[in-house]
Every structure is written in structure tokens, then in C-alpha cells.
Image (cartoon, rainbow, N blue to C red):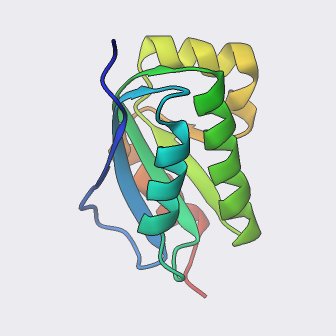
Amino acid sequence: MTAAVVLTPVSAPVADHVLVVALDGALDYTNAERLRQDVEAALGEEHRELVLDLSGMDFCDSTGIRILLSVRKLMQERDGAVTMASLNARLARIFKLTGLTSAFTLAASLAEAVAAVGARSTPR
């Protein structure tokens, strides 16, 4: 049995309209809906950009992928985006095979993701 995915806020030098969180564990059918609820609860009205640090996430199944896409849609409705940082080799392969590399902005590290978000967005 894999560990359930846990969402943890991350302190990072970002603007108020950016939320940075880390996902740790495995994202699968047993906990994907809970993760969606946790993300929605963490997002404030001011958040238009979401950075997900995936360095601690070791697995994602098709239900998890669906939830990540629903989070992407939510951020797009806010005229924002989701940036994902630090995918391990297994997740990078899943993202490549499923075409998610074109659905999300991917960054090699959290610092790179934060810099990318800062460069492309300004608060409204």
C-alpha cells in the first residue's frame, strides 16, 4: 500500500496571487478527490497561479491525472495556470506518455518554477 498524498503549503518568495504547495506520497483513486478538495480549500480568491512541488510525490494513477487536470481547469477559470516542479523520473515518464507535458508548465526545481511564475505574471 502506498502513502496517501499530502498537500503542504510551502513558504516561497512569491506574489500574493501565487500559491505554492508540495504534494507528498501517492496520488491515486483512493485519495484524488480529497486532494482536489484540499487544493480548493487552500486557494484564496486572490490566487491565480498555483505552483505544485512534486518532489515528494512518487506515484500518480489515471484518477490522479484527472484531478490534476481539474485543478488546471480551475486555475484557467481564474485566468491563471499551474506550474509543476521537480517531477521524478517516473512521474516525468507518465506526464510524457499521457501528454500532460503540454498541459502544464513544468520546471526542474521549485526555484525554477517560482522564477517562471514571477516572470510571466503580475498581480491584477
Quarter of the image for residue 11 reads: bottom left
Q: Quadrant of the N terminus?
A: top left
Q: Residue at x 51, y 41 (%)?
A: 84
Q: Quadrant of residue 56?
A: top left
Determine whether 114 is above or below 100 in the image. below
Q: Position of residue 27 (x, y in %)?
A: 47, 29
Q: Is residue 117 visible?
A: yes
**Count of numbered circles in the view:** 0
Residue at the bottom extreme, as displayed = 124
Which residue corresponds to the image point at 27% horizontal and 56% vertical from the top-left?
A: 10
- In the image, residue 102 sits, relative to residue 12, either above or below, namely above
Q: Residue lying furthest front in this view?
A: 30
Q: Quadrant of residue 121?
A: bottom right
- Which residue occupies 58% across, 20% down? 61
Q: Quadrant of the C terminus?
A: bottom right
* Rendered location of residue 114, percent (x, y): 41, 55
Q: Position of residue 40 (x, y in %)?
A: 52, 63
Vertical relation: 71 (above or below) 28 = below
Question: Is residue 104 at all visible to an observer of this figure?
Answer: no
The residue drawn where x is 63% and y is 52% is 71
Q: Position of residue 88 (x, y in %)?
A: 41, 19
* Left or right for 123, reference 42: right
